[in-house]
Amino acid sequence: MLIAEFMRFIETFAPLSLALDWDNSGLQVGDPKREVTRVLISLDATPNTADKAIELGADLILTHHPLLFRPLKQLTDPLLLKLIEHKIAVVSL
């Protein structure tokens, strides 16, 4: 399943349109055209969550809290770099 298809499925029971204006829900990291075969669910995307996703071979981390809450001025955060390096997408609801 593609990330875009996964997002459409998620929206059938958790529509992003119901999020508050200030909340940053949806695809946080990743390419919607990439394939997803394994999803790790977590409250937050943390360094430990990223390590577990790598260990389990997860393609996507589904979180409740957004990883990115404010606009980025630079991309130097070690967690973001690790997720990108390992091609792990993050979707926050």
Image (spheres, grey):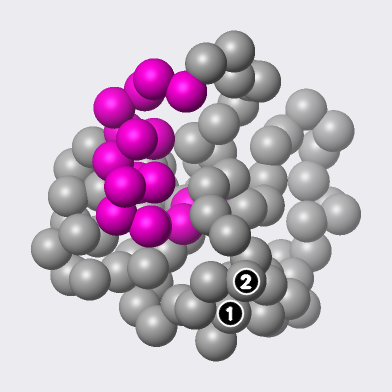
In the rendered image, the vertical position of residue 53 relative to residue 4, given as above or below: above
Task: Determine contact: label 1, label 2, CB under 8 Å.
Answer: yes
Q: Is residue 34 left or right of residue 49?
A: right
Q: Write down the quadrant of residue 16 in the picture.
A: bottom right
Tag 1, which secondary structure? loop
Q: Return the residue found at the far top.
A: 73
Q: Nearer the viewer, mark 1 or mark 2?
A: 2
> Which residue of the protein is positioned furthest toward the left in this rendering?
55
Left or right, 27 with reference to 89 = right
Residue tagged by mark 2?
Answer: 33
Q: Earlier in the sequence, mark 1 or mark 2?
A: 1
The kind of residue on which mark 1 rests is Leu
Quarter-of-image position of residue 73: top right
Evaluate whether residue 35 shows in this view. Answer: yes
In this rendered view, identify the residue nearer to me: 46 or 64. Answer: 46
Pointer 2 local density, CA inside 10 Å: few below 14, some 14–19, many at least 20: few
Q: Position of residue 87 (x, y in %)?
A: 38, 57
Is residue 84 highlighted in magenta? Answer: yes
Residue under pointer 1: 2
- Which dot marks residue 50? none
Instruction: Examine the structure image and report whether residue 4 is included in the region drawn in magenta.
Output: no
Which residue sits at x=18%, y=70%?
Answer: 56
The location of residue 91, given as percent across then percent down, is: 55, 55
Q: Which residues are magenta?
A: 75-93
Could you tell me which residue is drawn at 29 percent across and 27 percent down? 78
Q: Residue at x 53, y 71 (%)?
A: 34
Residue kind at label 2, given as amino acid type: Lys
Q: Position of residue 70 (x, y in %)?
A: 63, 20
Tell me: residue 42, above or below residue 1: above
The residue lying furthest to the bottom in this view is 1
Q: Pointer 1: residues within 10 angstroms few (<14), some, or many (20+)?
A: some
